[in-house]
Image: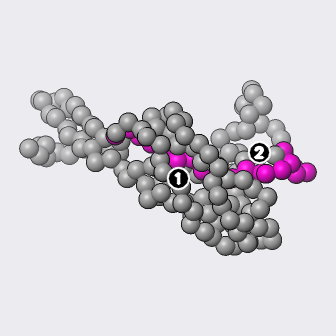
Amino acid sequence: MRRAGLPRPHPSPGLIEYKKVIEPVRIEGDGADGTVRITNGHDFADLSHLVFSWTYEAEGEAIGSGELAVPPLPPGESAVVKLPAPPDAEAGAEAWWTVEARLAAATAWAGAGHPVAWAQLPAAAPGTGRARALTSGRRRAATATGSCWAPASSTRPPAP
């Protein structure tokens, strides 16, 4: 495959996005409740050819990982799978679960361990941080705390 404008033999972001869109296994959920929903999107195969794993990251550092027990779901079926108890992390740290499905054995098209599907889920409910705009003359400054905030603009003065 020709990669226009890419000097190295790495897949382009578009190719990675395409792989994500067509992945045959859906991994969805809200990591904050400690579960994920696994859906088999195959038409004829169950999930016995895959191994599932989890990684727990806090502030970008992996602090725990292991295998995830997923039943060999028939085609088109789903199951809710419980994640393990999260490893200890610093209070207020941004934390994420990464769940992956990989080939258990080599096939004609890929080696054992090839990633087939993955998802990254927040490990806790979005932060309750508050952002407050401070105005002084024509200059504006914003102070934000917490892990979930977005810039906003208003002509009203900040709330006390």
Residue at 11% over, 29% down:
137
Mark 1 surroundings: few (<14), some (14-19) or many (≥20) residues within 10 A = some
Region of the chain picked out in magenta, as a range: 92-111
Residue at 77% over, 71% down:
43
- Does any portion of residue 121 appear in the rendered image? no
Circles 1 and 2, Cβ within 8 Å, touching? The answer is: no
Which amino acid type is marked by label 2? Gly
Of labels 1 and 2, the one closer to you? 1
Query: Disc 2 marks which residue?
Result: 113
Report the Cα–Cα distance between label 1 and label 2: 22 Å
Residue at 34% over, 40% down:
92
Q: Earlier in the sequence, mark 1 or mark 2?
A: 1
Which amino acid type is marked by label 1? Pro
Q: Is residue 100 magenta?
A: yes
Point out which mark residue 33 bears.
Answer: none
Q: Is residue 159 left or right of residue 17?
A: left
Taking the view exactly as shown, the residue that stands out farthest to the left is 160
**How far across and how far down the image is residue 23, in percent?**
70, 57
- Label 2 sits on a secondary structure element that is loop
Q: Is residue 63 magenta?
A: no
**Residue nearest the observer in this picture, 63 or 23:** 63
**Residue nearest the observer in this picture, 54 or 129:** 54
**How far across and how far down the image is residue 73, in percent?**
70, 69
Query: Disc 1 marks which residue?
Result: 84
Taking the view exactly as shown, the residue that stands out farthest to the top is 7
Q: Can you say whether 81 is above or below 88 in the image?
A: below
**How far across and how far down the image is residue 160, in percent?**
8, 44
